[in-house]
Amino acid sequence: MTEPLLEIREVECRFWVSGGLFKAKRALQAVGGVSLALARGEVLGLVGESGCGKSTLARVVLGLLAPTRGTVLFHGEPVAQLGRAALARRVQPVFQDPYSSLNPRKSIGSIIGLPLRVHKVGARSERRARVEEMMDRVGLARRLYHDSPGQLSGGQRQRVAIARALIMRPELVLCDEPTSALDVSVQSQILNLLQDLQREFSLTYIVISHNLAVVEHMATRVAVMYLGRIVEESQTTALFSAPRHPYTQALLSSVLTPEPGLGVPDTHLGIAFPNPLDPPTGCAFHPRCSHAMPVCTERRPVPRHFAGASTACHLYDSA
Amino acid sequence: MTALLKVEGLDVEIPLAIGTLRPVRSVGFEVERGKTLCIVGESGCGKSLTSLAIMNLLPRRARRTAQQLSFAGRDLRGLDERAMADVRGNEIAMIFQEPMTSLNPAFTIGNQLEEALLRHRKVSRKEARARALYLLDKVGITAAAERLAQYPHQLSGGLRQRVMIAMALMCAPKLIIADEPTTALDVTIQAQILHLLAALRREFEMGVMLITHDLGIVARIADRVAVMYAGEIVETGSVEEIFRHPLHPYTQGLLRCIPVPGKTRRGAHLGSIPGMVPSLLGPLRGCSFRNRCSYGFAPCAVETVPLAEVAPGNAYRCLLTPEACALNARVGTAA
Amino acid sequence: MTVESFIGLGERLQPSAAALLRRRVFGHATFVLGAGTLGFILLVALFAPWLAPHDPYAQDLSQRLIPPIWSERGSWTHPLGTDQLGRDYLSRLIYGTRISLLIGTAAMLMSGIIGTTLGVLAGYFGGKVDLAINFIVTTRLAMPIILVALAVAALAGSSLENVILVLGLLLWDRFAVVTRSVTVQIRGLDYVAAAQAVGCSSLRVLTNEILPNIVNAIIVVATLEMANAILLEAALSFLGLGVPSPLPSWGLMIAEGKEYMFFSPWVITIPGLALFTLVLAINLLGDGVRDLSAPESRA
């Protein structure tokens, strides 16, 4: 039984938000009790809508945010004990917005080479060679070395972000909506690139996306988040062919595939919007769930496991 | 059936210090009453500017010319700003992308809804309020009376967009122009809003012109489609024609780029369109897609490519024959 | 959807940033005017010994209060006349540029360093650091500059160095407030998170990622504070709390000449106009820099 590359154990993130003038601070639980394990070579798709906590979880994994409770472990070692530098060599991010993820005042070569300088890898001359080699691998022309991000297109900038993430050969790459801000024709180029690089460098990915079609294409396993918790986790094909949790079902039925004549489905979700500051009692999804039962307002469902998958829903309590 | 909105030969020019920009070139399409036309294209193709040109909301230094620009039989070109303001919000309503910024944060929802009607009709405030309540209910907002007194920041993105739709409907417009109305919304909310728009269009028999980059939305909601690239319409047709028998290499390329759950093989490369959109500055010759097209040949660089009709309403802008295009679709995954 | 998104020139999206900047800089009237005037004054200050016709400290009581050249009694020996001690006004004016520029620049640099450091730290770390620095800023704002200058003059005497010290240690509040707010905006951007994820220390993030991107804001505040410092020095010298006699500070010249202003108005109008011109030039320069840098701040 090989040890997982990444393990997230009961991670919780609580923020304190001011309640207004003279009012007490209120707790915002962005992430509540999330547990995940990731094996080497896997691509985990993390899906959910705004407010589900996936970006907060990403920051915890990257070491940019300390969880209020729980631990993140790399090869069994807690992240809190790894130094900043050691963690940086394990996991690197690729962010969503190619326009804000690159320092507008630096050159492309400087941006891609930053990790080499910070970790003091190689001599100066070697660094340039390594940067250029990386640029070749991600499909950037070498003559862009001295250009600034403002002179590049969105797709090119995202390639720079990928080059920066991979130049130190991390084990895990965390892609937070890597193509959401790009045009469709560029999106496919970047997705193809990510797939090729994964094979070439034996990478493990976490792909966070609200675009389920992209997740279905890239991921081997999918975890669905709602209001800070994982409601369902499964192998990709299983999740897409037979989703168990009502939210997953609604999410999947909302995917508008480019097939004419099918119309827009009615997801029966109602207009109630989850407020993270004032979450519903029991199961957070019950106000919008068409299968809601009395027990759903009382107790939060515990994840039930079925052969490599898990669902947190009272409908499966008897399983 | 006479078209509700008929556009032909629409051009937009923007003189800049570095040259003249032509972001919209010879654009033409029709929107029929009770039907949805989707204009689809990627960023920079000119689709948003087209809608602004129709409404005469272009930036000051832009110049608009059109061979025909008629709405419900009236020529929009001749209308001065005052007359156009009477049309906007009244007969043609627009819904924009960002529900966060389209509503004025300083006024209540009710106030803004009522104003939308009072600006164009001589009715009492009571009647305006009644209509606002009616429409809020129509767009699926419960507890409408309480909502009227709320401010935009108290509503979620999905709710705000519903309010925007209600506001657009206050004057019972004949045409709705929606520019990326769901791009900023979550997937499940998007589905709800589009479902709502389709239902309302049927009920009120309006024409809808929906601008988007998302081909999934187009497939599910459009009756007719116009594909734009680099300022031009490169293909038009019914939604069946565009998705089942795309002719233009760009349309074909776009459809190959999209992963479809259940259809695209996982682990395989997605189709892609290499290269980038060309510059729209200065004089433009030949086909604007040629630097990214796998099927180009010599005349593509020189000849102006006209829009060629293969069937009524189904046209494409390419020098290849329809048979050659159909063959490409069957054979190719793009380079 | 910006107009710029339509422009695609093959692989390069637009001409290099430097070329665009050059084009805009020289087309911008305010900037050119401000920079030009300031440059001229700077040159005057640098070449003062060669430009000034006389020694600015040389007194000649037989030549007291000679009017400037445009009056009937004026002569080319003293083109701008003389003051009440017979010192050549043109020479004093020329040497006065040195004092104004020196004080303006030194005070601006000192307060800039203090204010920027405090502002960036408060903006980046937030929390308790922010609270503490906020407290310091509030305390500073409660201190009136004139009274502090008075206390310093009483305790340590008035001198050029003391004026620079007082101004440098008191004018940093606007730097702190502005840099803090800009830092807060930048701190949330992805490239800062990326640098942190790469393993950069806080110091490295501050100097490499944050500082280069707030330089524009700093420059604008710097020009404002420089103008402010110059005017304050003139005011302090006028009150006798600034630069001591016989230094040719323009403020001091106005102070010393105020008894003669009805019969020899040039004694106060000439240094007054000089102050006005210098401060105007600096403000125009600041406006120009702000206008030029504003569209660039769009990524």
Image (cartoon, coloured by chain):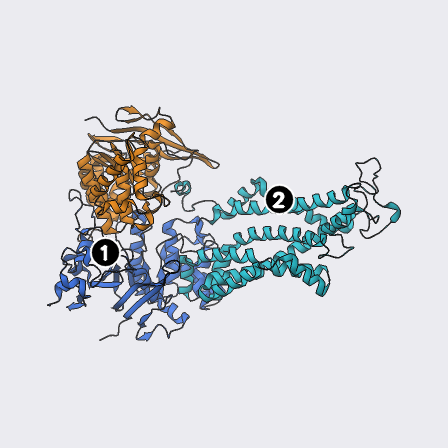
Chain colours: A blue, B orange, C cyan
Task: Give residue C22's position: percent from left, percent from top.
Answer: 55, 44
SS for dot 1: helix
Task: Give residue B200's position: percent from left, percent from top.
Answer: 20, 39
Q: Tell me the quarter of the image containing the N terminus of chain C.
A: top left
At label 1, which amino acid type do we have? His
**Residue located 35% across and 72% down the image:** A79
At label 2, which amino acid type do we have? Gly
CA gap, disc 2 and disc 1: 58 Å
Residue A155 in view (yes/no)? yes
**Subunit that carries the residue with mark 2:** C
Nearer to me, B108 or B210: B108
**Residue under circle 2?**
C34
Task: Give residue B332's position: percent from left, percent from top.
Answer: 23, 45
Work out which residue is located at the far left of the displayed protein and give it. Answer: A318
**Residue under circle 1?**
A217
Direction from residue B79 to residue C250 in the image, left or right = right
**Residue C262 bears which disc, if any?**
none
**Residue located 71% across and 54% down the image:** C239
Task: Give residue C197's position: percent from left, percent from top.
Answer: 39, 64
Quadrant in the rendering for residue B251: top left
Nearer to me, C220 or A61: C220
